[in-house]
Amino acid sequence: MKDYSSHFRNLVEVQLPDESRILTPRGGQDMMILASWRLPADAFRASKRSRMIRIVIEEAALQDYARGSDAARLAGDERFGAWLRSQLSAFDPNHDSPLGVEPTPVTWPVGAHILNG
């Protein structure tokens, strides 16, 4: 199956603030996209980052996506983008974790119903 990690990374990147940190670690059956960004300046922590978002796209959904036509994949991209915008609008990136302690990440699973309709 074709590697779609850079494709989905780009779809995520356009929805996030500029200069977000986005990683797509390899390994495992599902695709994982990790994202965080710098929060507005805090008097005590100028480089404070958001809570990490962990987007997990299920392997079965990716396989169905890969088997689909170009039009079906384009429709899937639109659904994924709409879903991500909805998730981000309800997401509070702020946290009260002390300096040096990573806040608990939030995991958003993506199944076939989101990606393939």
Image: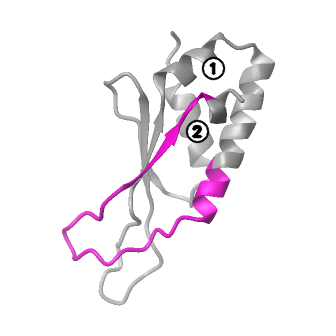
The mark nearer the N terminus, 1 or 2, is: 2
Query: As shown in the figure, which amino acid type bears the numbered disc 2?
Result: Asn
User: Residue placed at 57% from the left, 47% from the top?
Assistant: 13
Left or right for 42, reference 7 = left
Real-space Cα separation, disc 1 to disc 2, in angstroms: 16 Å
Q: Is 114 situated above or below 88?
A: above
Q: Position of residue 43 (x, y in %)?
A: 36, 90
Between 47 and 115, the one nearer to me in the picture: 115
View extreme (front): residue: 113
- Residue in the image at 71% along x and 47% along y: 82
Q: Nearer the viewer, mark 1 or mark 2?
A: 1
From the top left corner, tell me how far across and down residue 102 is, in percent: 25, 63
Rendered image coloring scheme = one colour
Query: Which of 13 and 1 lies nearest the eye of the viewer?
Result: 1
**What residue sits right under mark 2 in the picture?**
10
Q: Secondary structure at mark 1?
A: helix
Percent coordinates x, y for residue 104 in the rendering: 30, 60
Start and end of the magenta stretch?
84-112
| Label 2: how many Cα within 10 Å (few below 14, some 14–19, many 20+) | few
Which labelled disc corresponds to residue 65? 1
